[in-house]
Amino acid sequence: MLTLLLIIVGLALLFDFINGFHDTANAIATSISTRALTPKFAVFYAAILNFIGAVYSSGVAKTIGGKVANPANIDHGVEIVIATLITAIIWNLITWYYGIPSSSSHTLIGSLAGAVIAGAGFNQVNWAGFKEIIIILVLSPIVAFATGFVLMWIIRQLIIISGNHSRSRLNRSFRFFQIFSAGLLSLSHGGNDAQKAMGIIVFGLVALGYQTDLDVPLWVKVSAAIAMGLGTSIGGMRIIKTMSKKLMKIEPINGFASDLNSSIVIQASTAMGMPLSTTHVISSSIIGTGSVMRFHDVKWATVTKMVMTWIITIPISMILAYLIYKIIFQFTS
């Protein structure tokens, strides 16, 4: 039993580590693009704040650990967790390799549902809870686009009213503001994304009988926070290039607005205990704020590619997790 627990924890922390250099790249892409922060400092800065963010709450972890299925009443819970994590790791590595800002949240939720279907049956998925999570995942980028557009419009009007039209002076000011907005975004990212690995570990702990509730032990919080922090320190320049160059040209003004808007949306979701895709939120914020600046400069071909990846991630993850479960635990037994 201890061996199984170590396998689950090891895979979960590996997922969290990959999530660190896969998704955290999104949080610092705008500040690197505008040269508000150097790449090395930005990665270190984000790593520290991701760690801090990861340990201060656990609502999202409880949602991940119990919303999709009940780990206390499900058959083959340990095998389900293992298949879920293997699938999520594979998909994250594929999308990272090709520089596609896909969602670790989408792949984890899809993988968990697919593994539950394979190991315990279709009816063992809590479809009401699954639907609730999906609604947040779908709505959050739409909200981020809309609020990003409004926030950027307000900032632009304030600049017009102030009479400060010097581009160089504005760029200097907002590069300074970006130091704080990038930090807030990294803190927010850690508070939501690191909890997903915590939730999967708790799922495994309950399935193995080590605990009966969904409370997150301190050692789980610290382990996940360290794993994400270390992953962040590796960086993710492939994703950064997509976010900072292939969506549109980012200037300090809309870079600051994107970071601030993303932080607000992520913090609101975390306060509700709901996971969302930080990748989707940040991307949508960039597009929303950028549309106010120069709508026609948004590279809609890249946006379309990203949206298609977002759409296919959950069903592909479900199918892949189903197959991985069957291959490892049924066809080989």
Image (cartoon, rainbow, N blue to C red):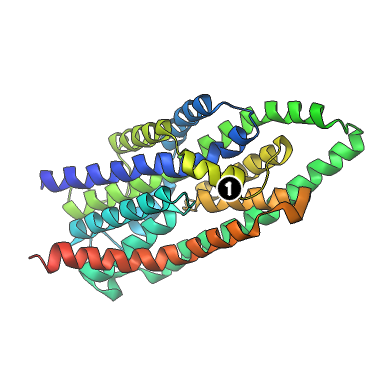
Instruction: From this view, report whether residue 282 is shown above or below residue 20.
Output: below
Going by the image, does 96 lie left or right of 262? left
Report the front residue among 26 and 186. Answer: 26
Disc tally is 1
Of residues 283 and 121, the one drawn nearer to the viewer in this rendering? 283
The residue positioned 39% from the left and 58% from the top of the image is 107
**Location of residue 34 in the rendering, given as x and y in whole percent from the top left corner:** 65, 33
Residue at the spot 24% in from the left edge and 58% down from the top edge: 83
Q: Is residue 129 visible?
A: no
Q: Is residue 130 above or below residue 99?
A: below
How crowded pointer 1 is (Cα within 10 Å; few <14, some 14-19, many 20+) is rated as many
Residue under the point 14% across and 63% down:
329
Viewer-nearest residue: 52 or 289: 289
Q: Is residue 277 visible?
A: yes
Query: Could you say whether the residue bearing mark 1 is in a helix, strand or loop?
Result: helix
* Residue ID at (44%, 35%): 235
Q: Determine whether, in the image, residue 126 is placed left or right of residue 242.
A: left
Residue 63, by quadrant, is bottom left
Q: Position of residue 180 (x, y in %)?
A: 62, 29
Q: Which residue is mark 1?
A: 282
User: How far across and down, in percent of the image, does residue 11 sit?
Assistant: 25, 46
Farthest left residue?
333
